[in-house]
Image (spheres, grey):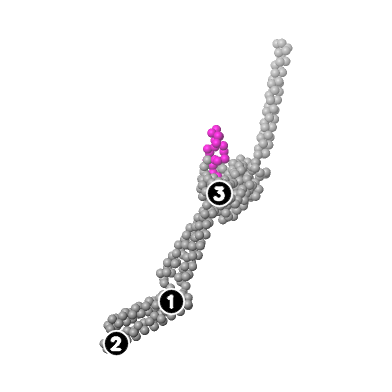
Amino acid sequence: MEPGASNLKCKCPCAWIGFILVVFGCLILSGCTGSAKESEVKATVPADAAQVISCLGRLVAGDGPLKIAGTTQAVVSELRVGRGSKVAGGDILAVLQDNAAATAALREAEERIHVAESSLAQVKAPPTPGAIEAQDAALARQNVVLQNAEKDYRRKKLLFEIKVGAAADVEAAEATVNGAQEGLRREKALLASLRQVRSADVDLAGKNLALAMATRDRAFVEVERTLVRAPTSGTVLEVYARPGEAISADRGLLDLGDTAHMFAEAEVYASDFPRVHKGAQATITGEAFAGSLTGRVDEILREAGPSTLFPTDPLVAADKRVIKVRVRLDDSPKVDRLSGSQVDVRIQP
């Protein structure tokens, strides 16, 4: 046996044992370090971060923009509001071109009512004392005429009976008596008509008055059709037709919104919907305002549909069904001028 071979056999096992120990030590140190780093990473991630529902949304005023239409194709004569104008329910927003003609027709109808009222009052009014006195005098005169005619008749009849008068004179006197009696009846009837009101005349005058009032009501409706009024209080968000322009069927006259109560309308994916509940706290951020806003889920709509906020790029999965969730903001004045702005919404489950 050579001397060198004996030394090699002694050294090889020791070298291998040392190498194995070094490798094993490195593995232990590496495992400990990785576990420490993993624990550190896990510690920095919030426990509920994966449960927060993140979605896109937009700011809306109240229940959303209210489109004020007015009469389609009508031309605006006067616009009484502008962007940002605060209005109350019933306020006139615009006057249409046909307003002048409709207002003139209304004034005419009101004058007809005055005439009909005067006619009815005249029919119902009792006769004047002077008219009754004059008729009483006429009746008295006719009574005297009758008495004189009757005396003349009796006289001529007596003369005829004693063979002094002619029969023709008696007949003439008798005709005069009959005429006087008819005249007396006529004067009595006229006096009676003066002292009473005819129901037929009153009825006719009343119908004329009702017709005039119906005409006035119709004219008033026509005037209101030429006035565009605010159905509720709010703020004018946008104006689409100005004086001289016609109101289109698509855009209407203007958009009205309740900016005093701002909402974030979030689009929640159907997969996240079971974790959303009314009253849940939400945080809203956006590029149009600094910082963040807070609010709570106020309403969950009942119908799912496609997203309206994602791009229409065919390569983007934008056909997912979403359910809209309305979040009432705690600080509406901060974003009351940002209706329609896109925001990011984070809802706590």
Residue 270, position as x, y percentages in the image = 53, 42
Identify the image quadrant of the C terminus: top right
State the separation of the CA atoms marked 2 and 1.
44 Å
Real-space Cα distance between discs 3 and 1? 59 Å
Does residue 167 sit above or below 224 in this rendering? below
Q: Which residue is mark 3?
A: 76
Q: Residues within 10 Å of mark 3 (few under 14, many from 20)?
A: many
**Would residue 290 be seen by someone viewing this image from the given angle?**
yes
**Image-based side of 213 in relation to 60, left or right:** left
In this picture, residue 212 sits left or right of residue 84: left
Give the image location of residue 203, x and y in percent.
42, 68
Q: CA distance from mark 2 to mark 3?
A: 96 Å
| Residue under numbered circle 1 | 195
Between circles 2 and 3, the one closer to the viewer is: 2
Helix, strand or loop status at disc 3: strand
Q: Is residue 274 magenta?
A: no
Q: Amino acid at mark 3?
A: Val
Circle 1: element type: loop
- Residue designated by label 2: 159
Number of numbered callouts drawn: 3
Q: Is residue 236 above or below residue 140?
A: above
Prevailing secondary structure class for the magenta stretch in the rendered image: loop
Which quadrant would residue 184 be assigned to in this image? bottom left
Q: Are marks 2 and 1 in contact (CB under 8 Å)?
A: no
- Identify the magenta region: 307-324
Q: Identify which residue is drawn at 26% across, 87% down.
A: 163
